[in-house]
Amino acid sequence: MDAMHPEILAQEGYTAATVQDSPVRELFPGIRLRPLWTNGTAHADLLEMDPGTSWPRRDVHEPGPEEVYVVAGTFNDGARDYPAGTFLHAPAGSWHLPSTTIGCTLFLFYPAG
């Protein structure tokens, strides 16, 4: 086993978060957001969607892009299904209609807020 390097954790801005310890906010019935990290503009979140849930309106990506990684389940953007293991890039100004038939967990990253 390699030697431990506690100085890694002392680096400014170096951080870790667990999903279980992240506060949960219900955005819509059956759709929950768990913030994992932010630097004031950019942020990373986990989104959990129960089976049969959908966004009630267009999800517009502003002011910047949205990066989506499907961690579990199957995500639908209003055009097609994306199984676990799929990465999506939605450029600034684009939109989709998130939904899921079987439920899904998404890792979301917003580099520009």
Image: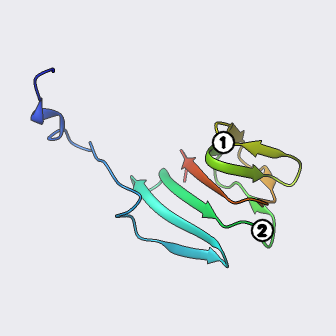
> Given the image, on which type of amino acid does mark 1 rest?
Ala
Q: Determine whether 59 is above or below 1 in the image.
A: below
Give percent across and percent down for residue 32.
57, 69
Q: Nearer the viewer, residue 2 or 57?
A: 2
Q: Residue 71 carries which label?
A: none
Residue contact at pointers 1 and 2, CB within 8 angstroms: no
| Residue shown at 10% from the left, 23% from the top | 3
> Given the image, on which type of amino acid does mark 2 rest?
Gly
Q: Which of 58 and 48 is in front in this view?
A: 48
| Residue shown at 80% from the left, 55% from the top | 96
Which comes sooner in the sequence, label 1 or label 2?
A: 2
Classify mark 1: helix, strand or loop.
loop
Give percent across and percent down for residue 73.
67, 51
Direction top: furthest residue: 2
Q: Give the side of residue 99 with respect to residue 20, left or right.
A: right
Callout 1: 10 Å neighbours few (<14), some, many (20+)?
Answer: some
Give percent across and percent down for residue 98.
76, 59
Q: Determine whether 10 is above or below 41 in the image.
A: above
Q: Specify the quadrant of the image occupied by residue 37.
A: bottom left
Classify mark 2: helix, strand or loop.
loop
Callout 2: 10 Å neighbours few (<14), some, many (20+)?
Answer: few
Q: Determine whether 105 is above or below 51 in the image.
A: above
Give percent across and percent down for residue 7.
11, 34
Residue pointed to by mark 1: 84
Residue pointed to by mark 2: 52
